[in-house]
Amino acid sequence: MSQKVILKGLRLYAYHGVMPQEQKVGAYYTIDCEVEADLSDAIQHDRLSGTINYADIYHTIRREMQHPSALVEHAAGRIAQAILDEQPGATAVHLRLLKENPPMGADCQGAGVEISVNRLIDNSIRL
């Protein structure tokens, strides 16, 4: 059985971007996050200790979004790694990070990245 804690459609204001104007003015970002974990204890026994608290995931995402990056790839990787670092029960993180109304001369809802990061058995390789 696939087991995930999901946050969908988080909307945060941040200052990521290559262009100086993006770093100064900022933009809204939409984030979808899925955290894979063994949730069987929560499913069977109705205990918060048997799951990953989605409020904790939100606070990690919010904190990491406050640190500007030139690239959304870097911001997404940093968020995913922070979730894995702070949630020992998490086995993988799937994250979509979209900048709303990106400065590229096109009318679109958003542009960004989608990444998946699995917990490494050997921690010598990190994002």
Image (cartoon, rainbow, N blue to C red):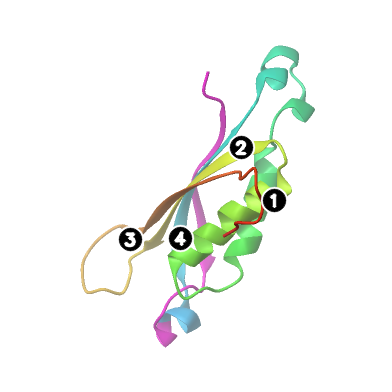
Rendering quarter of residue 89: top right
80 sits to left or right of 63: left
Which of pointers 4 and 1 lies earlier in the amino acid sequence?
4
Residue linked to disc 2 = 91
Which of pointers 1 and 3 lies earlier in the amino acid sequence?
1
Rendering quarter of residue 66: bottom right
C-alpha separation, residue under disc 2 versus residue under disc 3:
27 Å
C-alpha separation, residue under disc 1 versus residue under disc 2:
11 Å
Q: Which residue is at a point 45% across and 60% down the rendered structure image?
A: 29
Q: Secondary structure at mark 3?
A: strand
Name the disc covering residue 111, or none. 3
Which of pointers 2 and 4 lies earlier in the amino acid sequence?
4
Q: Secondary structure at mark 1?
A: helix
Classify mark 4: residues with Cα within 10 Å, few (<14), some (14-19) or many (20+): many
Name the disc covering residue 85, or none. 1
Q: Which residues are magenta?
A: 1-21
Residue linked to disc 4 = 29
